[in-house]
Amino acid sequence: MLFNTAQYWLFFTAIVTAYYTLPARWQQPLLLLASYWFYMAWDPRHGILLAGCSLVAWLCGVLMEDCDRRHAGRQDGRRRLIFTLGMCCLFGVLFSYKYTGFFLDSLRDGLAWLGIRAEIPKVSPFLPVGISFFTFQSASYVIDVFTRSAPAVRSPFMVMLFVSFFPQLVAGPIERPDNLLPQLSKPHVFDFARVPRGLAICLWGLTKKVLIADMVAPVVETVYSVPESFPAQILILATVFFAIQIYCDFSGYSDIATGSAHILGVELMTNFRRPYMARSIAEFWQRWHISLSTWFRDYIYIPLGGNRVPALRWVFNIYTVFILSGLWHGAAWTFIAWGALHGTYMLAQRWLGLLVPKGVQSAVSAVIPAPLRTALAIGTVFIMACAGWVFFRAGSMADAAAVFAGLGDWRSFSPGQIWSLGLPRFEMMLALGSIAMLLAVEALIEHAPNWCSRLWAATPIRWSLCIAQVYALLCFGVFREVEFIYFQF
Amino acid sequence: MNHRTAFDGTVPASQPWGRFVKFLALFVLPGLFLAWIHNSFPYIRPGYELVVEEKSRLAREGGIFAAAPAARPRLAVFGSSVALSGFVPRLFEELSGGTVDAYNMGLPGSILYFDQLESLVKSGQAPTHVVVTNPWGGDDPPRGLALVWNDAALRDALVPFHDTPRDLVLFALRSRTAGGLAALYDDTRHVLTALREDKGFHFIKSQSHYPNDALPEGFRLPSDKPDEVLWRTFHASGAPFERLRRLAREHGIKVLIVPRYLRRGEGAEPPAEDTEATRQMQPYPEIEVVGPAYWLLPPALFSDPTHTNPAGAREYTTRLWNLLRDRLQPAAVAASR
């Protein structure tokens, strides 16, 4: 059941109506049932996996708390064992579904490269929707209980609801127990003001998904299916389109999740803060998929020592986090390359800052006016991000190499090629116009937030914008069922 | 980490339902305006929509085979825009020496054309031969509650004017090179007159971007598969197929599956017989597969990567006549019925 379908909105309307009509004690069971219904609409068998992960997390929490009671809060071996077993279970599930095929293939290729022929079986990929999201959310619960950042929950149903809460179940944000559990635990009373606000957030998310991401998708698909056939101009256009597509697709999903949860009285964490307005790669990662980057920061980077370690160890920490982040997105060398590239960016940014003397930096700042400096920084980060997206989108390392090789061919371009990329002229113009509108809105919210808030508070403007968005969706939106890209992760 | 965005403007809590009703009232205004334009100015719509609508109307109300003497073979060629721009009924009739009545029932963008065949039968215009160029859909279009599972169909049903803004923009853009808005509006009206006069044939000029409406020699698309035979898959089950068989049985219609046309290089040269389609249709005597899966025509006979120009249409129609001539002799027709 996709957010961009009538089915979801009928389902959501029915759930909201029942949620606020039924007695408060039925709200949690209703949400739990609705969440499993939502998830099992893809494949009923996967509900068992979801319940299994949730129950493992719950059991670990309860057993660790029992250990605490017996040993007055000391970390004992048994508690550690429970934690380790729990994590092995959760990540074992993720590994077996997502990475087995990749590791066996890589092993076979590696052995073949060494001249050893081994009979290693081929495993067909079979990935339950959103598995990376709900295993990470379950893991965050187990880790937080282990580190005593969150109390264990006695009710298994509450943990099941925490892991499966339908607005954020299949593509995040990856929530933490301290934010989501207290909100799910308390009863909610209908507040009319939440409905238009929540719907406005959903509408913006739908606009990004249906009007922009799905609109440019055919161009990206056409070019990246045979990248060696296109000149540099087309490859650049497709890569920029993909940068916009993946942002609008994923942040659009997060917006709809946030808006839906808001109507149900639950505030989800912010997952995107205008990442293409970032002025450095570090800032990009503070704005892009925030729930995942903070997960890696809190549960891997900081426990490894963060940046308060010797330089070489810091390099190791950075690459570990970014390569794991790449692997989280997909079991392929392209994702590992994407992660490694971003890790390299982070190191380069830090060391360039250290290498260039402060005096030179101040002199450059004095010569280049601030707005131009900002624009240059934003442009540079965008180009760097796009270089990373080439790996992210390419079907293989060979395809990624073909894209980079194609950047040298500027001569074979003819303007007519633009119209044979799977998007008619009107839709191409519409896509470009929508992207310009998106960037203008993001720039305004970024640089003049108070002005935007005042504008939004004016009823005629708010209503006009909402009505215009709905008609834009109805008249220009892509009404095929296009899955969200992040579902595959 | 609460979600704070620019959307967090103040929404007065007083009289929320009254405000909601006001909002709804304002919301329908643009829709009413678009619906008025949609209904009042039909000829701003793109040609393909008008073609489908006009052919559906003619099938319902008469004007396709109504005047045809019952003894003559009546040939209705069904398919998508490829058939629309590829089959010239007047030429086919001329090649037959006036012994056959033909009509081009090509419906752009459609794989569901048995509604129109059913309309033809109901309005007393049943063809003797239905010629099919491309596979039909496996399912009927969704209706009633089933619309909930098909967003595009739901939008078509609830907001039939959803393409009006797009049509308006494209119409305004086209009018700059077509002598102005009024001239283009009249031209579009005349396209339908020409469509009726040409017995359903329509040359898709609007997608032609090359000189003389001909693709250059050596034209290629990245999606071309010059080494692969592009077989067709015909659904031998499902409501549309059952409807086709029922109509054929009840009204003595012979269904002929014929080759479509492709651009040279778009696919490999196919075998002389469409073995794949023949195998699929073997159990059904009312359906016959004739000729290869497709004919490859040179790029110069195409006005765009998919559709033939008038010269290409003449070539395709002539090939089709040569393929079907024996089956359309009166004796053969009488025997087959």
Image (spheres, rainbow, N blue to C red):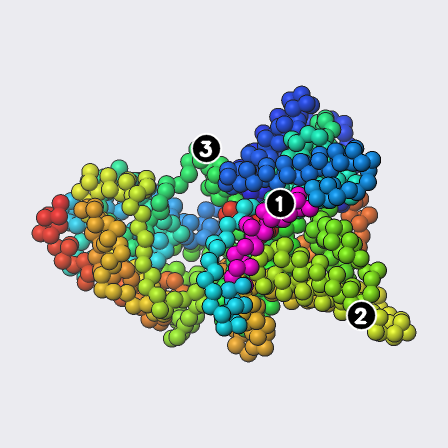
Residue A241's x, y, as percent?
Answer: 60, 61
> Which comes before the other along the chain, label 2 or label 1?
1
Q: CA distance from mark 2 to mark 1?
A: 39 Å
- Above or below A409: residue B330: above
Residue B14's x, y, as percent?
Answer: 76, 27
Q: Which residue is mark 2?
A: A351
Amino acid at circle 3: Leu
Would you say the magenta stretch is mainly helix, strand or loop?
helix
Residue A371's x, y, as percent?
Answer: 81, 64
- The secondary element bearing badge 1 is classed as helix
Q: Is residue B173 visible?
A: no
The nearer-to-camera label among 2 and 3 is: 2
Name the side, left or right, on which B282 lies relative to A386: left
Residue B42's x, y, as percent?
Answer: 46, 46
Q: Could you tell me which residue is drawn at 24 percent across and 42 percent down?
A: B245
Q: Quadrant of the N terminus of chain A?
A: top right
- Above or below B98: residue B215: below
Residue B222 highlighted magenta (yes or no) = no
- Above or below A457: residue A95: below
Q: Which residue is mark 1?
A: A89
Q: Could you tell me which residue is drawn at 36 percent across and 55 percent down?
A: B81
Amino acid at circle 1: Cys
Q: CA distance from mark 2 to mark 3?
A: 62 Å
Name the side, left or right, on which B333 lies relative to A385: left
Q: Which residue is mark 3?
A: B145
Q: Which residues are magenta?
A: A83-106
> Are tags 3 and 1 found on a single chain?
no
- The secondary element bearing badge 2 is classed as helix
Q: Could you tell me which residue is drawn at 65 percent across and 67 percent down?
A: A387
Q: Chain of mark 3?
A: B
